[in-house]
Amino acid sequence: MYILNGNFFTFILVFGVCVVYIFELKKRLSNSIKEIKNQKENYIAVLNHDLKTPTIAQIRALELLLNEEFGKITPEQKDMLKITLDSCCYMYEMIQNQLIKCKYEDSKLSLEYSNFDLISVIEECLNESSNKLKTNSLTTDFITPYTFCPIYADKNGIKKVIINLLSNSIHNAIPASNISITLIKENNKIKLKINTKSPYIKKNEIKSFFKKYSKCSDKFNKIGIGTGFYTSKQIIEAHNGTVIAESKKGEFNTLGFNIPMAV
């Protein structure tokens, strides 16, 4: 009986030590999670304020210089300013895509559905991209049989996708070529395509575009395509849609998406 009691008390002692140890581990884990969360929030704040804001100012200043708002510039100066502007746009889009990705992974970016005109949103995106188009001597055609295209979706999310796909198309289009944007309806779905004359991309490289982390070929690496296409895919799939990425030798490359007209 004494031995049994001794074993019992030993068991209680060991069990108690284990419980205390588990609670201590849980406490440390909770503190570690909080610390990681704080670090991530600080990282997002740095991206948003310390990097994004000054980058926007740099882009606007370079655009004014290229438009000769402060006086004439030489062709050599214009070429250098174009290279600098392209670099700043690259930085801004990487920051923007990283912010969106962080919010998506934290489930902070929820879809806010509303009724809006998709044609107006596309025209807004083209207007916001006008300086990039001008810098690369590109022209655009927006082809659609409609004057109004109602849709029920997350307006800000869809606009981010269009801006991202359009930016990629602009940066990789052959200079002085044309970008064609088509919008049609098929089986209660809306299909948007952005066609550009740009270098051919192999099928295996296209498949890697929409992965969370991807290394793309030198032909298609001018901007943060890895995070940009990944977040675009996340947004489109959240709308029960699919992304489009196609390339044909000697023809046009195509980026776009299909989404339902309403959920």
Image (cartoon, rainbow, N blue to C red):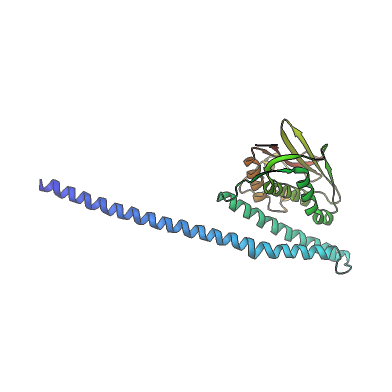
Classify residue 64 as left or right of residue 33. right
Which of the 4 image quadrants contains residue 263? top right
Quarter of the image that includes the N terminus: top left
Q: Residue at x 71, y 34 (%)?
A: 189
Classify residue 123 as left or right of residue 214. right
Classify residue 44 as left or right of residue 70. left
Point out residue 231 in the picture as x, y percentages from the top left corner: 64, 48
Q: Residue furthest left?
A: 1
| Residue 210 seen in render | no
Q: Residue furthest bottom?
A: 70
Q: Residue at x 17, y 48 (%)?
A: 7
Q: How many marks?
A: 0
Q: Between residues 146 and 227, which one lies in front from this camera angle?
A: 146
Q: Residue at x 65, y 49 (%)?
A: 226
Q: Residue at x 12, y 47 (%)?
A: 3
Q: In this rendering, is residue 244 above or below 32? A: above
Classify residue 130 as left or right of residue 214. right
Q: Between residues 57 and 179, which one lies in front from this camera angle?
A: 57
Which of the 4 image quadrants contains residue 119? top right
